[in-house]
Image (cartoon, rainbow, N blue to C red):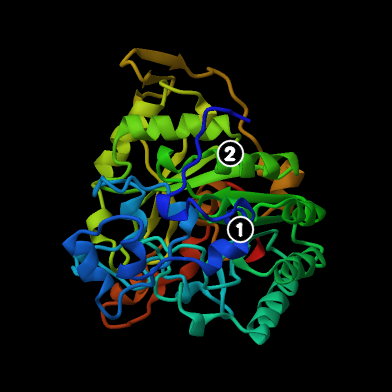
Amino acid sequence: MPADFTSRRAPVYADVPDEKWNNWRWQLSHRLNSVEEIEKVLPLTESERKALNSSGLFRVDITPYYISLIDPDDPDDPIRKQVIPTDKEMVPFTAMMEDSLAEDKHSPVPGLVHRYPDRVLMLVTTQCATYCRYCTRSRIVGDPGATFSQAEFEMQIEYLKHTPQVRDVLLSGGDPLVLAPKILEKILRRLREIPHIEIVRIGSRVPVFMPMRVTDELTDMLQKYHPLWLNIHVNHPNEISAELAEAADKLSRAGIPLGNQSVLMAGINDCPHIQRDLAQKLVRIRVRPYYLYQCDLVEGAGHFRTPVAKGIEIMEALRGHTSGFAIPQYVIDAPGGGGKIPVMPNYMLSMSDHKIVLRNFEGYITTYEEPTEYTSHDPKTCAYCQNKRPEPGQAGITGLLDGERMFIEPEGFELLHERGGVRHRLKDEHKWQPLGIGSGEPEENL
């Protein structure tokens, strides 16, 4: 474990005994959420004071540990901006949405989002250790009245039992690691009883907000349910402390692979040098950068948004300038529920039927000669192709490439072109059955 990461404790907590400070339950029960409490740690700006005194604002709670990482003399501190609200949250912006990712639309049962064919997002709580001001689920997160009931949990489990294509379950919320240990273990045990679920993942910001939660008791319990993966959420190098490094070390030693998901935000981490430092410090504590998200179109987060071009600039500054495994994938989680769409600089400049033209991070331009003879992979003789079909309705672009379909139509496309609804022989649907492309089979036989 790297020895050069430091610890910080705000002066107001100097007399708190270590046994209390390092107790995650003490941290939860002493969170700060009012003007009076926060001003004991740092002076507030008028914008922050106005926001904290406003009604209807997204919930505020900050652990003593996390607020101690803030430089009290810097109103632009990157950690401060993530958890202390300003009056900018109350300013609407174009395309702002309550549920920008259409998660509710893709929920077959309460608290379960089935967006992709083989995996689901399982929301197990609406509570967090600290609340991020850009939270994409602020419509429910932080609201005790929105917590999922035992009956809804049973509905989630029943759906998973009867949906055999699901092989990967991501636990999120809220934050699963704020749950009582017995409840979290019950969830993991119930999931492991379902034979077709291969992978369980946990998405958590608790190791960042409250690293003392990662106890030996927790890691001993988690490793009983392998294969289990955990993604944390670090946005800035200042969040990587000695305590986080120790928590990551404990999780890694328990055999839990660690990834990091961060959000690109104006005034916090919209700098190529900050992002490179973040990536390199993460891999030093054995956390692999996984995603860099474009900020969602969620209510209250307009002042955090950057142009997509800024993300492209950052990716340009990472590729070739640090190790490949230290480079996250820059994605836009598509508004309306389209899922994560990767975005990156253009490295392929041109192509012909025998050669492609590429450039590297330095601007060096080269060519790659295509093979003159290539026998195409035959899906009709491949056992994997025959047995691993995409789920109906979600084949997407790969379905076109596999030959299952010749086109994808927008909703209502056929009705739009009916021109009055008259049906005649020229509109015979059999004319659009594939005759020899790909598998050569009609779609209904696939």
| Secondary element at tag 1 | helix
**What's the residue type where badge 1 is placed?**
Lys
Residue 387: x and y, percent? 74, 53
Determine which quarter of the picture holds residue 349: top left
- Residue 408 is marked as none
Given residues 373 and 260, the one toward you in this image is: 260
Residue 167: x and y, percent? 70, 59
Left or right, residue 326 beside residue 255:
left
Given residues 218 and 109, the one toward you in this image is: 218
Q: Residue at x 18, y 68 (%)?
A: 91
The correct choice, above or below, for 173 with respect to 149 in the image is above
Determine which quarter of the picture holds residue 427: bottom left
Return the disc, 1 or 2, that comes first in the chain's sequence.
Answer: 1
- Residue 245 is marked as 2
**What's the residue type where badge 2 is placed?**
Ala
Left or right, residue 433 beside residue 390:
left
Residue with the mark numbered 1: 20
Q: Residues within 10 Å of mark 1 (few under 14, many from 20)?
A: few
Residue 271: x and y, percent? 29, 35
Q: Are marks 1 and 2 in contact (CB under 8 Å)?
A: no
